[in-house]
Amino acid sequence: MTTQWNDPAETTSTPAPALAAAPPSPPGGIDYPVRYWVDFPEGPRNRLTVFFRSLMVMPIFALLVMLTSSNQSWVGLAPLLALMLMILVRGKYPRPWFNWWVYLVQLSARVMAYFVSLRDEYPSTDEEQAVHLEMDYPQDDTLNRVLPFVKWLLAIPHYFLILLLGVASLGAALAMWLGILFTGRTPRRFFDLVVAVNAWGLRVQGYAFTLVTDRYPPFSLGFGVSGGTVALSALIGIVFYVVMIALFLGFVVGMMDPAMFEPGRGLATPMRGGGFR
């Protein structure tokens, strides 16, 4: 009887390749080369540190100021022009400049998130923590060589929108701060609005000033923010500004010498021909 030997390569079945998992949707639902989001704090918050947040942030804020002031290459106009010329001549974004800029913006994002009470963890100088910022490095020959010189002009519509949304973001931050103090929990609707406005500003910054992408920023908040939340937060922000202005004017008037308003002195000095000066 003849024994037949089978080749193991023929008898062993090859497993079917697994289907690649679909990539996760971008944070906030906006696909852009500059992505920013903050993990929502599900548990109870530290009310004591939230109440004194403006004082507790001072040490790390002072460090951030020293970093930015000692590295004028990232905050001055001359380095921005140098980067524009680099892209114009070589069509290339220097990788060391990109890495330093990403680090500095990430640190700034953590400090800001802590200051407005998005998170309770004290900002780290090197760890990502719960505040995330991703920037895609622009590969060689992917950037338009002339566009960097006019991006700041093309982004003007965004400047006005960010200015208006900044009022709503301030109102949302105040409402979130009060909500944490009274309930120990983070109001999700105001949290999402503050994060969404910050993300919008970072996208515009990445397009017009950091120059990491030629893709125009979308006019969208994302993060599921509703129009009602924006309107309510804007109202809170406007009321806050009005109260602050009234207090400031009251302080200025209170510091004035009452004698200035007496006849013959100061603002009430009679003028020739009648009336008061």
Image (cartoon, rainbow, N blue to C red):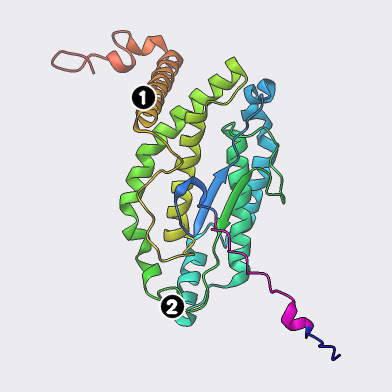
Question: For numbered disc 2, what is the local secondary structure?
Answer: helix
- Looking at the image, residue 204 sits to the left or right of residue 15; the answer is left
Q: Quadrant of residue 136?
A: bottom right
Main SS category, magenta section: loop
- Mark 1 lies on residue: 235
Report the residue at 68% width, 41% height from top.
123
Figure quadrant of the N terminus: bottom right
Which label's residue is closer to the chain start, 1 or 2?
A: 2
Using the image, tell me which numbered label, if any, was put on residue 108. none
Report the residue at 53% width, 49% height from top.
36
Question: For numbered disc 1, what is the local secondary structure?
Answer: helix
Q: Is residue 150 above or below residue 219?
A: below
Using the image, tell me which numbered label, if any, was put on residue 88. 2
Figure quadrant of the C terminus: top left
Give 104 or 74, whichever is nearer the viewer: 104
User: Which region is colored magenta?
Assistant: 8-23
Residue 274 spot, x, y in % from top left: 15, 13
Q: Quadrant of residue 269?
A: top left
Report the residue at 40% width, 23% height from top.
236
